[in-house]
Each structure stands twice: as C-alpha cells, then as structure tokens.
Image (cartoon, rainbow, N blue to C red):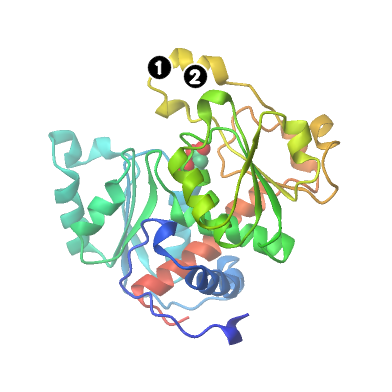
C-alpha cells in the first residue's frame, strides 16, 4: 500500500480526535503501523527515538493503553516518565491540569494524557508545545484505540470498507465506539448499533455517521444483528461514568457473548473488544477462532509505535 501513499508530515501534530484526520491520513498511519510489526514483536530493533522522552500522564486507570504506549516508546529506543495514579502528584495539592501539562511539556518530547473529563486532552494541547496524544478523555474520544481497531479490522478482514459491523453495549458512555463509528463511516461500512435503550449512541455521533453517508441501523435483537455481521465490536458497560448506581444495576448483564450465541453468526465473524471485559464475553469464547480481542490489544503496540515515530519525528 505504501507505494500509493505520498509521504505525509505528522511531526509535532497532536492526536486528539479521529475527526481531525482525513481518510488518507488514517490510511497512511495504518500503513506505517504495518511496517512496525516486526519492531513491535522485538524481532527487529532501531533506536530511532533514542534521546527522546515521553510523558505518560494517566489521571484514570489503564492497562493496555498505558503499557502499550510505554512499550512502544521503549521499543523505539526512547524513555518514559510519568504516573499512573494522580494521587501521587501535585494534583493532590490542587494543581491545575494546565500547570501539570506545562511541566510535562518542558520535561519531554511528547505527552500522552488520559483524563476523566471530556475535552481535557484538547485543553492539554493548548498548554503544550510538544505533541499531545489523547489516551481517552472521559466519555469523549479515544483516537489511538480507534486506529488500532481499524488496523485490526484491516489485518483480519483485508479491507475495512463493505464490512457489516455491529457495535454492541454501552454506546452512550463508551468513548471507543464514539471514535470508531466516525472512522468506520469514512470507509463506507454497514453499521448496526445494539444497546440497552438507556445507553444509545449519542445523536452527535449518529449525525456524524449520516453526514459521512452511513445510515446506521438500530436493534436490541443481538441474535438477529450478528446473523450476517463480519465484525462484532463488544464494549463494557462503563460503570464509572454512571451518575447513579441504580441506573447501572438496571443495565448490567443485559447481554453476554457465549458460544451458543455465536451459532447465530457467520463462521468468520470476528469478535473485538477494547478490553477490559467484565461479564460481557464468556471466557469460553476465547478459544474460538472468532475471538480477536487479545490480538487487537497487541495491535496497540505497532499502531502507537507508528504514531510516536510520526509525531516525535523518528526516521522509521
Ligand atoms: N479501555 C477502553 C477505554 O479506556 C474501554 C473500557 O475501558 O471499557 O475506553
């Protein structure tokens, strides 16, 4: 694919929302990620980010996003500073996000930030000269997850367009599906949204899909929805975003993927999940060829390596 793509310059660019990127730019990043696979696996090594420092600022819990960013920086020869829990920082003393970002800006060459408030990454970018990468801002967006989700569909299905894709679960608070619905619409896929009535996809995201020419379908009938689907993207109900616990208790456990349910789907249906899963995918599914979610999580490394290399300006 690379021979068709002219070289693009991402040096210094913030990665805040997937909506800031054209389809051509996304294709370019995905192509770069493909080239990173042997480096992500440790089969090849080039210290193209030697001497560079990444600030990894996690104001919210994370396993995959934080570790895969850190692994990516290390595998490119760079170093990482930061925190995974803000209670050990001056935030505890009342420091503003802007001031914390100003400090990280002067200590590093790029900043990865995860924060519980929507819009926090965009705000951070205003206070930093170095590139800021949004690692999830509340119920808002998760652009790097989106890129690894697209990369996974591309590598598993050999193309993104024309796939029938079901987004299932907490479509209201799930930031990964907000980003993914937009990006998939750029590729002209068929989208079906399946969620409890109180956790429907926000209108803003639906309108965005429509503006890009995709008219999503809605159903609460999961058996029917997966019948001719190529991709089933499952999400966790985002407990931490619910204003009241009772509302959460009403919807928790409303859907579960197990081998019985999969009998309704195509043989080559792939099941994705940004993880962590809680109760929505039965562990028995892990052994099926349909389960792609752990591979998907690995794909975070080549994709984030490609992004760091591009925005910091490595030569790979
Ligand atoms: N890990 C993903 C996120 O940070 C999905 C989730 O937490 O359910 O948004």
Q: Residue 64: x and y, percent?
A: 50, 48
Query: Callout 2: helix, strand or loop?
Result: helix
Disc 1 under 8 Å from ligand 1? The reply is no
Residue identifier under label 1 = 244
Task: Look at the image and tell me in which quarter the N terminus lies.
Answer: bottom right
Mark 2 surroundings: few (<14), some (14-19) or many (≥20) residues within 10 A: some
| 161 left or right of 71 in image | right
Q: Say which residue appears at 42% left-offset and 78% top-offset.
A: 48
Query: Callout 1: helix, strand or loop?
Result: loop
Please indicate, yes or no, whether residue 119 appears anywhere in the rendered image: yes
Q: Residue 230: x and y, percent?
A: 75, 51
Compared to residue 255, the image places residue 26 above or below, namely below
| 47 left or right of 235 in image | left
Distance from label 2 to label 1 (Cα)? 7 Å
Mark 1 surroundings: few (<14), some (14-19) or many (≥20) residues within 10 A: few
Q: Residue furthest top?
A: 246
Disc 2 under 8 Å from ligand 1? The reply is no
Q: Which mark is residue 248?
A: 2
Front-most of residues 103 and 233: 233
Q: Residue 92: x and y, percent?
A: 18, 34
Q: Residue 241: x and y, percent?
A: 41, 29
Front-most of residues 5 and 85: 5
| Number of numbered markers | 2
State if disc 1 and disc 2 touch (CB < 8 Å): yes
Q: Say which residue appears at 59% left-offset and 85% top-offset.
A: 4
Q: Which mark is residue 168?
A: none
Please indicate, yes or no, whether residue 179 appears anywhere in the rendered image: no
Front-most of residues 182 and 232: 182
| 61 left or right of 92 in image | right
Compared to residue 66, the image places residue 6 above or below, namely below
């Amino acid at each position: 694919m690379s021979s068709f793509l002219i070289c693009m310059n991402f040096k210094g660019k913030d990665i805040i929302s997937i909506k800031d990127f054209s389809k051509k730019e996304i294709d370019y990043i995905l192509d770069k990620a493909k080239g990173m696979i042997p480096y992500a696996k440790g089969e090849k090594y080039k210290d193209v980010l030697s001497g560079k420092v990444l600030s990894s600022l996690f104001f919210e819990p994370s396993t995959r996003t934080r570790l895969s960013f850190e692994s990516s920086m290390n595998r490119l020869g760079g170093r990482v500073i930061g925190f995974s829990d803000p209670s050990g920082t001056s935030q505890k003393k009342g420091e503003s996000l802007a001031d914390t970002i100003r400090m990280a800006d002067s200590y590093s060459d790029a900043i990865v930030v995860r924060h519980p408030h929507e819009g926090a990454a965009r705000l951070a970018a205003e206070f930093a000269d170095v590139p800021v990468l949004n690692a999830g801002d509340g119920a808002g967006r998760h652009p790097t997850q989106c890129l690894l989700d697209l990369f996974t569909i591309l590598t598993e299905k050999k193309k993104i367009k024309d796939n029938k894709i079901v987004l299932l679960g907490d479509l209201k608070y799930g930031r990964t599906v907000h980003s993914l619905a937009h990006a998939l619409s750029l590729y002209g896929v068929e989208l079906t949204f399946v969620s409890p009535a109180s956790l429907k996809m926000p209108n803003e995201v639906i309108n965005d899909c429509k503006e890009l020419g995709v008219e999503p379908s809605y159903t609460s009938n999961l058996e029917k929805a997966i019948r001719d689907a190529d991709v089933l993207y499952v999400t966790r109900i985002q407990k931490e975003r619910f204003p009241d616990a009772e509302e959460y208790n009403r919807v928790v456990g409303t859907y579960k993927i197990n081998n019985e349910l999969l009998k309704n789907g195509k043989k080559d249906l792939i099941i994705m999940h940004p993880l962590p899963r809680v109760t929505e995918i039965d562990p028995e599914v892990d052994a099926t060829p349909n389960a792609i979610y752990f591979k998907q999580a690995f794909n975070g490394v080549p994709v984030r390596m490609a992004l760091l290399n591009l925005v910091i300006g490595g030569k790979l």
